[in-house]
Image (tube, rainbow, N blue to C red):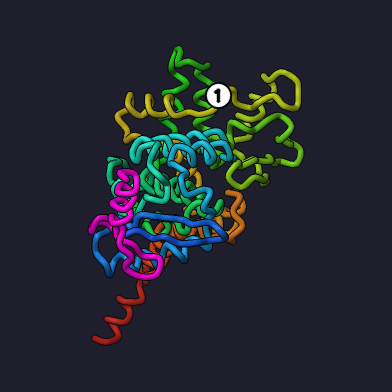
Amino acid sequence: MSKHKKTQETESDWSKIGPCLYRYRKANYYALVRFKGKQIRQSLDTDDLELARRKLKKFRSDLETTKPSESRRTIAMQSETFLAGLVGEPTTKDNATRSIKNLVEHFGGDTLIKKVTPSDCRAWIATFELSADAKNKRIQHGRQFFQAAVDDQVIPSNPMEGMKYFVRAKRTSITPSDEQFLAIVADLRAQVWNGHSRNDSADFVELAGRLGLGQAELAGIQRQHINLEADEIVVFRKKMKQGFTIPIYPEARPIIERRLEAMTEGPEQRLLPQDDCKKGLAAACKRLGFPNFEPRSLRRYFITKALRLGVDVPTIARWQGHRDGGVLIMSVYGDIVRMDHSQKMAKLLAPKPTGDNIAQFMAATA
């Protein structure tokens, strides 16, 4: 008798409101749907009837694009799957791993991934006190994380799909003058000890400015990439996943020849022993009281100098390994190109000497 009474009381807790829609104890609404031979019950997390009907409609639609067996997948479970499938350079994988570990910590590993909403994702990004670039990386990693769940039919849609990237603050790039560049190189050569041979650091900085290459490109140059007879160097850029060829410019050739003579034999011997020049360059700028020029300033120095000496934009673009005919160079250095042209045009307006023509004209008029 007591058992029958308990069953009756349990059944009375549920009220059928409509097809597949139930209410529990006059509180929250639930969906009760039969899908592919299985009965699925899901809380609609609302006590509002109209909202419950909309959620029921979405729930039934989502069943067509997701696997019921994955309905209990948590953030931690998805994290384990996602991180196991990461590919790319070590730094790329490390950055993504840090972002996802932070995501798991923020949402909680036991949280069901299907419960995460777009507003939850915006709240997660808002916790970062980072630059726009760094926040955009977190958005990118989070979007990839949830998209992987969509692709695996765990969730019907990506909660970060519509999130906008932050606008980066306009960066003011500074470029050393000829005098500053030469002073930096001379300062590095004058140092007794800086972790490397003083000439190693000085050569790295000088070649960055004489060849117009970035740190990774310079560090990757080997003996086999240099052809003195043909006057050219093959450069490999990781971002492009391919090589391009540059001339050995006159001011860089003495340094390259000197280093080749001092190197041990072997095609894979590196031209420069270190991977970057950040610390040496920063220290030299500090000692000389210069602005804090970054390594990328040395590439900018090379391009700016070439433009002002009259080298055409398409040629500089090829020297930089670009295949756009100079579009990127013009977008970054267009002001220099236009100002150089403007100054040449302005000189056409300079007064020209006329000799005795004016005096003769005035005398004839009188």
Camera sees residue 309: no
- Give the vertical position of 346 relative to 137 (above or below): below
- Which kind of residue does numbered mark 1 sit on? Gln
Left or right of 195, for residue 217: right
Decide whether residue 129 is among the magenta residues: no
Image coordinates of residue 208 in percent, x first then y, are 52, 36
Taking depth in this image into account, of 92 and 54 the one nearest to the observer is 54
Q: Which residue is drawn at 30% across and 43% down?
A: 2
Left or right of 102, for residue 365: left
Decide whether residue 10 is among the magenta residues: yes
Image coordinates of residue 140 in percent, x first then y, are 44, 49
Q: Residue at x 31, y 58 (%)?
A: 14
Residue 151, picture quadrant: bottom right
> Tag 1, which secondary structure?
loop
Taking depth in this image into account, of 290 and 265 the one nearest to the observer is 265
Which residue range is magenta in the image? 1-28
Image coordinates of residue 293 in percent, x first then y, are 38, 36
Q: Dividing the image into 4 quarters, which one contains the C terminus?
A: bottom left
